[in-house]
Amino acid sequence: MAKRSEKAFYITTPIYYVNDVPHIGHAYTTIIADVINRFKKLSGTETFFLTGTDEHGQKVEKSAAERGLKPIELADQVVGGFKDLWKALNISYDFFIRTTEPFHEKGVQKIFQRLKEKGDIYKGSYKGWYCVSDEYFLPEDVPLEEAGYKICPDCGKQARIVSEECYFFKLSAYQKPLLDFYAQNPKFVRPPSRMNEVVSFVNQGLKDLSITRTSVEWGIPVPGDPGHTIYVWFDALHNYLTGIGYDWNMELFKKFWPATVHLIGKDILRFHAIFWPAFLMAAGFPLPQTVFGHGWWLKDKTKMSKSKGNVLDPYIILNTFGSDPLRYFLLREIPIGLDGNFSHEGFLHRVNSDLANDLGNLVQRTLTMIQNFLNGKIEEADKEKEGDKKLRLEFEALKEKTIKFYEDYALNRALEEIWSYINSVNKYLAVNEPWKLSKDESKRKRLGRILYQAAAALRTIAYLLFPVMPESSDKIWSFLGERKTIEEESFAELKFENFKLGQKIKKPDPLFPRIALKAFLKEEETRPAPSRKEEKMEYITFDEFNKMDFRVGEVLKAEKVEGTTKLIKLEVDIGTEKRTMVAGVADVYSPEELEGKKLIVIVNLKPAVIRGIESQGMLLAAEVDDKATIPFFDKDVPTGAKIK
Ligand code: ME8
């Protein structure tokens, strides 16, 4: 096959499962890909950026059934949520692939058939511990728990024994070729620590991989044996080929394959760094250049994921701040190989200090001075003095470093460098005090020079920031009176002196809102659910509902919990026994008001200790503006009656 042109760059994100609503974690990967892709485009490279959704398999089948939907109906709903989020985040992808599209299914079947004919896929039978949640057979070395079952090492859920006739991929035959390949391409897996992980795993030996299922209907049928469906990972990984035209637009495919970088979270490294190159070797395709496994965003120190119930909705930030501050924060806060703990406090702190104070103020000050002191135009400037020149030269060095860091996916380092330059420009203004020169007509040229240096520096800052903050960068360029767009100027042409005297400067609008933490967090708590019903509505089955035991409870005794303003300790008769419960209602109800009242309690909620008191159940209340209103019964009902 023809080799991909050096000028062509192909970047991918994982394709996301459609049983999950998009959260900050998904946003993170897609933002990184977008930033690198935008940078490459600015450098004059022809790029292709692929993202999409992984729609087959047991997980999706199960989630759809729980919602009373067909799998494709669930997929159709969730895909809308992903596409909307990418739009809100200003993600500029070239193609969005869905694995349920006929061209993808056909392409996967074709490759499957090819490997079968070649003998790399064969029929056998497999019995093993299977994790339904992660859809894979556990490695044999996972120990048996005392209770007699195995726990999935990735998600921590209980696995079960599955035995079925299936097709195998001869992964064992690729152990040596893979090890040779890693040795010859030490940058295939990045960062380097992840490469070590992969090599040591492969060194332990590879077993053949079961790549079909008879127990899963929702998948691509095995060609010629429709009782079997293709394992979701075999199906999904091939999106990287079908998404750029394999089997339907071979010209496009030849232009961009092999991929320059598959960007993934470290959770799916093994699939991308071991299975995927083995599949490609077997089918005779050239291998991707790099698999980059980034770290995780954690919430309260655990990985954000739907199964743990700790995902953060990106719209909480997007609705108030727009996309640039979130893009900036996620990339600036941690190097992309490491994990980071996400907090709204941390986000706000960064936005207020880096964006509103450092950058926002610089833009505002510089442009307002040009408006007020020079009628919106720098017409003349005196010669550069040493201090002025320093700012220009610092830019030259910055440009080189930023390119290097972007090239190296060290996005936080690129941003650090740009911020250090922003601080230099702020310092330059503080030292030169242009506001003091404005009243002296004889200093007009000097004033022109100082404001020219600041504006020219700002122009380069906006350019260098464009991959990360495209919207704000475009705004700064337009405030500066640039006629060309940022994307029309290549990195090679970017020069300090390309800011021209005489450009008409516009009055700047504030770029970044400054929002107080309290106000923001308050808003976050009370924010109504986003309008897309399917994104937020989490249905439970009737069986799940039936597990909840709601009863009529009678309050026998109530007293305030010492040292708190909101908590009341209640003794509640639930018909069969007396329970202690703690409720946060003291700001609305007095203990006396509650005694003797009948209300609704859930009695099989796991007890929780609140302020040292074990609360053995919970009463129900409507919550409006952080205040509780308890529904009481308007007719007498027997204590302990079940509520259905
Ligand atoms: O694994 N922090 O899909 P998925 C950072 N369909 N990134 C996170 C994250 C977090 N807390 N949570 C998720 C699948 N991600 C397969 C992929 S590819 C052929 C098939 C990101 O919906 C990260 O990139 O579970 C991770 O790898 C991906 O979402 C998993 O998405």
Image (cartoon, rainbow, N blue to C red):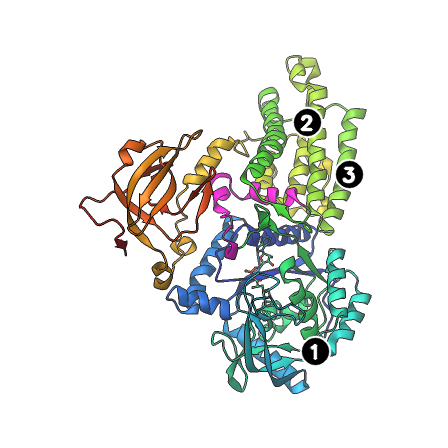
User: Comparing marks 2 and 3, which lies closer to the viewer?
Assistant: 2
* Residue 639, x across and y down, in percent: 25, 49
- Region in magenta: 306-334
> Is residue 559 left or right of 302 when viewed as pictured?
left
Q: Position of residue 522 (x, y in %)?
A: 45, 35
Q: Quarter of the image containing the C terminus?
A: bottom left
Q: Does residue 526 appear left or right of residue 415 in this picture?
A: left
What is the residue that sits farthest to the left in this orientation? 635
Quick one: 188 or 511, which is closer to the camera?
Answer: 188
Query: Looking at the image, which residue sits at the far front?
Result: 577
Tag 3–tag 1 contact (CB < 8 Å): no
Quadrant assignment for the N terminus: bottom right
> For the residue labelled by badge 1, is the local secondary structure a helix, a strand or a loop?
helix
Q: Decide if residue 294 is in sight here.
A: yes
- Out of 413 and 8, give the one closest to the viewer: 413
Q: What is the C-alpha distance between the residues marked 1 and 2?
A: 57 Å
In the displayed structure, would residue 195 be above or below residue 119?
A: above
Visible residue check, residue 96:
no
Q: Is residue 8 above or below residue 419?
A: below
- Label whose residue precedes the other's in the sequence (3 or 1): 1
* Foreground label between 1 and 2: 1
Q: Residues within 10 Å of mark 3 (few under 14, many from 20)?
A: some
Instruction: Say which mark, if any, is on residue 282.
Output: 1
State the image quarter where residue 292 is shown: bottom right
**Are circles 1 and 2 on residues that touch, CB within 8 Å?**
no
**Disc 3 target residue:** 396
Q: Please, what is the three-letter code of the amino acid marked with disc 2? A: Asn
The answer to whether the beta carbon of the residue marked 2 is less than 8 Å from any atom of ligand 1 is: no
